[in-house]
Image (cartoon, helix red, strand yellow):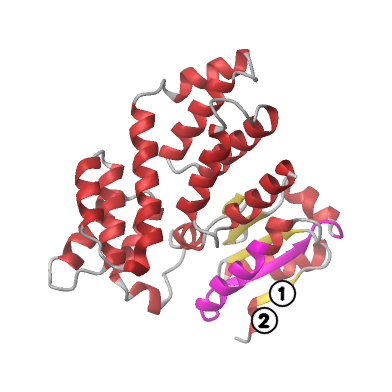
């Protein structure tokens, strides 16, 4: 298939039925709900196109302009942008809202169709996909096999450290990070160290249920907002954590010596400048600052 046949715009409910619902009987179809005014949509769209192209015709991408196609929006119940819905066998089976990383999107797709050959053949990518799917033990097993030889790939060591951190072996994870000497991986190592910091902090804080209960009684409980954000960061639930930290910064930027601002910058470093969430929240933080 050509690029024009695997990625296409949808106009009208009848075309949606034909090009999305009917096509999904043969192969999965991602539907990207976007709008011209939505900055995260513009970040996400080229990423979706790149991922779709890697499947060499086994995956389709339909783009729906929500400002124009209100009937389709109403039919799917889309309430926020960007929203991406995966259709398979004539019905929606999965999806997400908000910005997502490439690894997160590929992990979702891997549940419904085989990975592209180039991806599946790479054990490091396989481990990354397992990790992004929350299958940390399986990812760790793949990495142990990969690292058992003489080739100690820095990227594999860093991901291995993340697996160790997920099962609470923080000291072991730190030791693995200390073995990574590749200067090119300096940022990635710093990002994992930030994650270890959030995990250590979260272990000393009230649990999420207690914090949410406090916020239900007082939405302006700044300490609870901060602590809940750290708990969410420790669980890699980045979007609500960033939102909580940004709102705390806007409301009370001097709280705890400006910790909301400092933590936002830590998360930006952890995720990396190319992550859609960083793009969106860095812009919003700049607007709040100036």
Q: Quadrant of residue 145?
A: bottom left
Q: Are marks 1 and 2 in contact (CB under 8 Å)?
A: yes
Query: Image point 74% across, 46% down: which residue?
Result: 287
- Picture disc at residue 8: 1
The x and y percentages for residue 52 are 56, 73
- The part of the image, by quadrant, that contains residue 186 is bottom left
Most foreground residue, 98 or 158: 158
**Rendering coords of residue 162 (x, y %):** 31, 51
Is any atom of residue 34 visible in this view?
yes
Tag 2's secondary structure? helix
Left or right? Give the position of 27 relative to 208.
right
Give the residue number, with chain letter if any, for mark 2: 5
Residue lying at 58% horizontally and 53% vertically, measured from the top left: 278
| Above or below for 222 versus 27 | above
CA gap, disc 1 and disc 2: 7 Å
Question: Could you classify mark 2 by the number of other residues whose Cα lies within 10 Å: few (under 14), some (14-19), or many (20 or more)?
Answer: few
Residue 5 quadrant? bottom right
Residue 29 shown in magenta:
no
Q: Quadrant of the C terminus?
A: top right
Label 1 environment density (alpha carbons within 10 Å; few <14, some 14–19, many ≥20): some
Taking the view exactly as shown, the residue that stands out farthest to the bottom is 2
Q: Is residue 51 magenta?
A: yes
Image point (69%, 52%), residue name: 283
Number of marks in the image?
2
Q: Which residues are magenta?
A: 43-68
């Amino acid at each position: 298939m050509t690029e024009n046949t695997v990625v296409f715009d949808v106009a009208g409910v009848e075309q949606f039925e034909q090009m999305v619902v009917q096509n999904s009987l043969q192969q999965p179809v991602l539907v990207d709900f976007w709008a011209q005014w939505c900055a995260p949509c513009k970040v996400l769209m080229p990423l979706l196109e790149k991922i779709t192209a890697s499947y060499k015709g086994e995956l389709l991408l339909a783009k729906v302009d929500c400002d124009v196609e209100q009937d389709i929006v109403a039919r799917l119940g889309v309430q926020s942008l960007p929203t991406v819905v995966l259709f398979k066998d004539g019905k929606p089976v999965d999806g997400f809202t908000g910005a997502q990383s490439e690894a997160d999107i590929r992990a979702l797709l891997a549940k419904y169709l085989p990975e592209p050959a180039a991806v599946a053949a790479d054990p490091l990518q396989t481990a990354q996909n397992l990790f992004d799917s929350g299958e940390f033990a399986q990812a760790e097993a793949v990495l142990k096999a990969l690292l058992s030889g003489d080739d100690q790939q820095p990227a594999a060591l860093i991901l291995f450290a993340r697996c160790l951190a997920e099962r609470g072996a923080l000291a072991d994870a730190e030791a693995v990070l200390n073995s990574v000497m590749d200067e090119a991986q300096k940022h990635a190592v710093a990002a994992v160290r930030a994650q270890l910091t959030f995990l250590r902090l979260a272990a000393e804080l009230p649990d999420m249920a207690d914090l949410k209960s406090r916020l239900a009684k007082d939405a302006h409980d700044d300490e609870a907002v901060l602590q809940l954000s750290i708990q969410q960061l420790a669980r890699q639930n980045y979007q609500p954590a960033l939102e909580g930290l940004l709102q705390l910064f806007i409301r009370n930027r001097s709280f705890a010596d400006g910790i909301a601002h400092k933590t936002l910058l830590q998360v930006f470093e952890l995720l990396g400048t190319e992550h859609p969430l960083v793009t969106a929240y860095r812009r919003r933080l700049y607007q709040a600052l100036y």
